[in-house]
Amino acid sequence: MGTMVRIFARICGVSVLGFLAFAMGCGRFERPRIPNVIVVPTPGSEKTGNYTLDNYKTDMAAYIAATTGTVNNTEAMRLRNNMISGLMAEIDYAFYDYETKLFLNQGSFRVGSDLLQLGLAAAGGISNGSRSKTILSALLSGVTGSSLSVDKNFFRQQTVQAISSSMESNRDRIKALILTQEKQDVSTYPFQAARADLIHYFFAGTLPGGLQNLQQEAGVRAQDQRKQLENQMQAPVTADDIACATGVNQAVAKAFADNKLDQVIAFLQAMKVLDAGQSPTKDKIESSLRALGWNINTDATLRKQYCEEAKKAKLIQ
Amino acid sequence: MALHRQIVDGNQDLAAQEKGLNFMEQSTFAKVISYAKSTGPIPQGLAPNEVVLQDVPIGQQPKALHLEALDVNGDATQVITQQLATGKIVVFHDISFVGGQERMVLGFR
């Protein structure tokens, strides 16, 4: 029992010292002080222009009046857009405040668990008994495990930076959509539709929204990658294809050795890799043959044409 | 001489891949110098192998390539001995996809 108390005292001593050093060295670092003209809730009784529930109720009542009976479209649009802008500003405030806390909370958790790990490792190093060391290393693996668990379960092993950019890009996309819709009249884009988009806008700025968007982006990237890889892949080869390529290769080798390149030139012209009427150099012929050879590896249709034209040019039977 | 890379479908069986590599050599006037499974991220369902070819002077095309496959941790001694006895030499040996599964693939000519 006495050993356990000593171990605990050592852990606490090292961890607390580390934390104090960290806390004293850093001070306020999460964000600068929010100016009074922006901060929500409004300080004192001053109005800062933030959109309150009372503002919303007033605008909503006026909007309903403007869209009931004889519709006053200009006034209804003005009120709808006013509500959209007001709500959007409130959502933006909530989002940026949340985003800052997200960075800060994950950072604090990491710093805390790092300090605890350092403390446990240090205490393990200075402990005498093997039993104490065993207990400390068990505690140390527990702390490391909980840090990994937070990464796995809350952040799905994504960094806060990645989630944050994902949330921002998704929000920007929805915001652009809403701003485009603001030009529509209230029969095409009533406030109820705007409200649905604003809800979407709000949830795009949450941890699940960011993770979901990241997952979708990863899915699209994987599909693109798959397509790219499939396009680069060699098309299936038949025995006839090999006979054709081998025949052309041998015929070209003979033509080069004999310096009789007319048939090869005619073939390349028919394949449209050399212009008709050109007198190409041997190097040009060679590079054209090689480039064409690469193209027929991935393009099965071109390969068929290659063998047909090689027959016509009498390079192969 | 210039080097080129090409992707070959590792979902094909060994004979189809052998045909593919020989066609590539003949059509591009080149020779295979290495063959292995792609090292980049692989989308599900695909099994890309990457082949590296080196240009050869026209008229100096080497003999056809022959492939043999073993289990990933299999003993290649017997296969190599057999092929050496027929006058072939080892061109490459590495892990590649064959029929979508990882195998040790040896190339001889």
Image (cartoon, coloured by chain):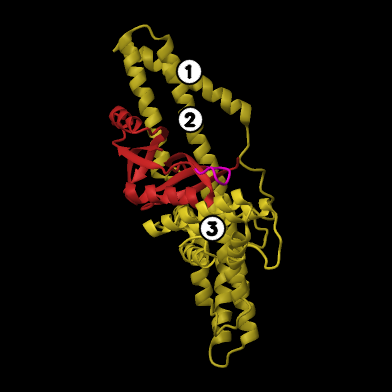
Chain colours: A yellow, B red
Q: Nearer the viewer, residue A99 or A78?
A: A99
Residue B31 image position (x, y, % from top left): 50, 42
Q: Nearer the viewer, residue B12 or A201?
A: B12
Q: Which residue is mark 1?
A: A14
Q: Is residue A65 above or below residue B53?
A: below
Q: Residue furthest front?
A: A258
Q: Which residue is mark 3?
A: A295
Find out whether residue B29 is within the magenta segment.
no
What residue is drawn where x is 71% and y is 61%?
A: A279
Q: Amino acid at mark 3?
A: Asn
Q: Amino acid at mark 1?
A: Val
What residue is drawn where x is 46% and y is 44%?
A: B50
Query: Circle 3 marks a residue in which chain?
Result: A
Q: Is residue B63 above or below residue A242?
A: above
Q: Are marks 2 and 1 on the same chain?
A: yes
Give the alpha-carbon distance from disc 1 to disc 3, as whole Å.
66 Å
Q: Which residue is mark 2?
A: A112
